[in-house]
Image (cartoon, rainbow, N blue to C red):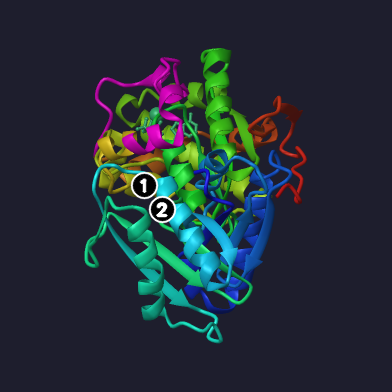
Amino acid sequence: MTSCDMLLLRFGEITVKGKNRSRFEKAALSHVKSLLRPYPAAKVIHEFGRIYVELNGEPAENIIDALKNVFGVTSISPVKVVPSELEAIVAGAIEFVSAICPGPEATTFKVSARRVWKPFAHGSQEMNKLVGGPVLKASPHLKVDVHHPELELHVEIRERRTYLYSKVIPAAGGFPLGTNGKAMLLLSGGIDSPVAGWSAMRRGLEIECVHFHSYPFTSKMAEEKVIDLAKVLSRYSGQIKLHLIPFTEIQTVLAGTGQDNLIITLMRRAMLRIASMLAERNGALALVTGDSLGQVASQTLASMNVIGRVTELPLLRPLVMSDKEEIIGQAKRIGTYDLSILPYEDCCTLFVPKSPSTNPNLHIVERIEASLAGLTGMLEAAVEGTETLVIKPHEPVQRKAGDEAEIKEDWF
Ligand code: ATP
Ligand code: MG
């Protein structure tokens, strides 16, 4: 990528969002700037509908890898910049093409010029020929194919400068981080919930993670695993909060009811009630889980129905219609898979019944809960006992009692 001096970042569907557009673009711009901190010479320029990153000698490939994770950006092109003068454009095009496609194997090729700056002396069609001819002469292994070329050289003529590019590298897409509000992610140590969290972030949600542990029955290793998973998620958001909730006492009481086949239903409902309280405290308007329809007994439609009725908040299940293989593929791509398959126990695996109900009865479940006089108080106590960590991708974890851990608003 020697011939590239700038990156062009494009926005996708956010451009159709009318008056919200500038707010959305600003959020993506801040995200880009935060990821460029390790590259001080790189300069960011925001233009309506686009972001340019002038590399000024910083490494293109590393920066592309980082910026591919900016939500709201759909694609990135490495660009060569030349003055908007015919000779400079032709010379630049010859150099650009020979750098990315040196031959000798035959390659099909086409020029797609676009005269954005109308005072430029030559029109788009004319420029295709004025650039294409000399490029073909300089690189005889190229062969013109205007329909399905392997190499399409874009020539975008603007007032001050002309941009030459061919590659269009797909990026994360979605909406810029935090532009669609905040939700609490129920983060277990499994494969699904980190993927659900990433999907929610990609849709513009700010996420705070909630994890239930049964320490000392679950180990510190299991907790470390969840912290590490949250750390991977923080790479996509700059930082993330993780609320650790003591769940041992509640689980013990629920198990004490002797309702073996309903225990998972009861535990999930307790988790949702606690997560809803934390949502209220933290200004979140939804809960996100890693549920996928039919995957396990607690994720049948009947189970989801009975479990979900315990909260009034919208329950977002990004993976509900995904197959496990698709979820695993995504977990690998976002970097959570290898952590998720570490064999540490989750609080729920401690109480796995022989035959969990796939069709729980809401009235029976509510009756059991009503018979547990201290349950609501215990849920509130669990909220009070929350430990909140602020997790950043490259820094040691800050631990604080309560859920008051500071999160800097200006992290971007
Ligand atoms: P995952 O791979 O995300 O753990 P799973 O297939 O193992 O999912 P379950 O164990 O049934 O499914 O959990 C369903 C969802 O409930 C999880 O995706 C997660 O959102 C939430 N959940 C389960 N256990 C916990 C926990 N200990 N803390 C927080 N959330 C949890
Ligand atoms: Mg699980």
Quarter-wise, where is residue 300 in the image?
A: top left
Compared with residue 24, is residue 97 higher up or lower down, i.e. above or below? Answer: above
**Disc 2 and disc 1 in contact, CB within 8 angstroms:** yes
Q: Is 355 contained in the magenta span?
A: yes
Please state which of residues 355 and 404 is positioned toward the viewer in this rendering: 404
Q: Secondary structure at mark 2?
A: helix
Please state which of residues 304 and 48 is positioned toward the viewer in this rendering: 48
Q: Could you tell me which residue is drawn at 69 percent across and 38 percent down?
A: 38
Instruction: Give percent across and percent down for residue 202.
Output: 48, 52
* Boundaries of the magenta span: 329-358
Q: Could you tell me which residue is drawn at 46 percent across and 60 percent down?
A: 93
| Distance CA(mark 2)–CA(mark 1) | 6 Å
Compared with residue 205, is residue 214 higher up or lower down, i.e. above or below? Answer: above
Instruction: Give percent across and percent down for residue 219.
Output: 54, 13
Asked if residue 221 can be seen in this view, the reply is: yes
Q: Secondary structure at mark 1?
A: loop
Distance from mark 1 CB to nearest ligand 1 atom below 8 Å: no
Please state which of residues 171 and 7 is positioned toward the viewer in this rendering: 7
Q: Could you tell me which residue is drawn at 43 percent across and 43 percent down?
A: 196
Please state which of residues 394 and 3 is positioned toward the viewer in this rendering: 3
Q: Specify the amino acid type for callout 2.
A: Val
Instruction: Give percent across and percent down for residue 204.
Output: 53, 57
Q: How many numbered marks have been drawn onto this rendered protein structure?
A: 2
Instruction: Give percent across and percent down for residue 258.
Output: 37, 22
Q: Is 357 contained in the magenta span?
A: yes
Asked if residue 315 can be seen in this view, the reply is: no
Q: Specify the amino acid type for callout 1.
A: Cys
Question: What crowding class fits label 1: few (fewer than 14 Cα within 10 Å), some (14-19), or many (20 or more)?
Answer: some
Residue 97 image label: 2
Compared with residue 202, is residue 15 higher up or lower down, i.e. above or below? Answer: below
Compared with residue 296, is residue 119 higher up or lower down, i.e. above or below? Answer: below
Residue 101 image label: 1
